[in-house]
Image: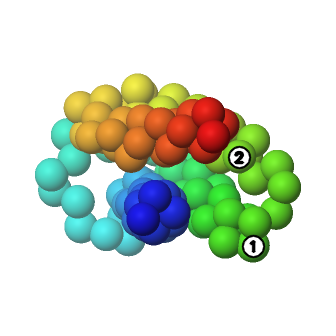
């Protein structure tokens, strides 16, 4: 069950990051955004979303060291969330969930 939650969170959270890219390049109508996403930050949103999808694949393949990529990805994601806090604050929830799953995995 824990693996299902982790895989689902990785996939969905990664795809949600693409919204920032869509906003920056005006590919998606996002009238609910209160702050415009510049194109350079849109590339960051895209990159972090792709990293989450990469972690999803690495985890599914059970390749060693994928947890390190996860922690870096969560850190970058949280940095973007802090910059766009008003619009993206709820993205902290899946980031925190992924860290908790990581800690539970280390604890055994």
Question: What is the CA distance from the residue labelled 2 to the residue labelled 1?
Answer: 12 Å
> Horizontal and vertical percent for residue 45?
52, 51
Task: For mark 1, give the secondary structure.
Answer: loop
Q: Quick one: 59 or 83, which is closer to the camera?
A: 59
Percent position of residue 81, x then y: 41, 35
Q: Is residue 78 left or right of residue 73?
A: left
- The residue shown at (67%, 71%) is 60
The tag on residue 37 is: none
Residue 61, numbered circle: 1
Residue that extends furthest to the front in the rendered view of this protein: 108
- In the structure shown, which secondary structural element does the residue marked by tag 2 occupy? helix
Drawn side of residue 88 relative to residue 37, left or right: left
Q: Residue furthest right?
A: 64
Determine if residue 15 is in view: no
Q: Is residue 1 visible?
A: yes
- How dense is the environment of label 1, judged by Cα within 10 Å: few (below 14), some, or many (20 and up)? few
């Amino acid at each position: 069950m824990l693996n299902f939650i982790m895989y689902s969170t990785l996939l969905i959270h990664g795809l949600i990051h693409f919204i920032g890219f869509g906003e920056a390049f005006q590919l998606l109508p996002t009238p609910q955004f209160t702050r415009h996403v510049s194109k350079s930050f849109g590339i960051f949103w895209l990159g972090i979303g792709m990293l989450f999808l990469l972690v999803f694949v690495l985890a599914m393949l059970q390749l060693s060291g994928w947890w390190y990529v996860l922690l870096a990805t969560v850190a970058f994601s949280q940095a973007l969330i802090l910059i766009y806090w008003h619009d993206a604050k709820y993205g902290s929830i899946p980031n925190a969930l992924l860290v908790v799953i990581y800690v539970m995995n280390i604890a055994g």
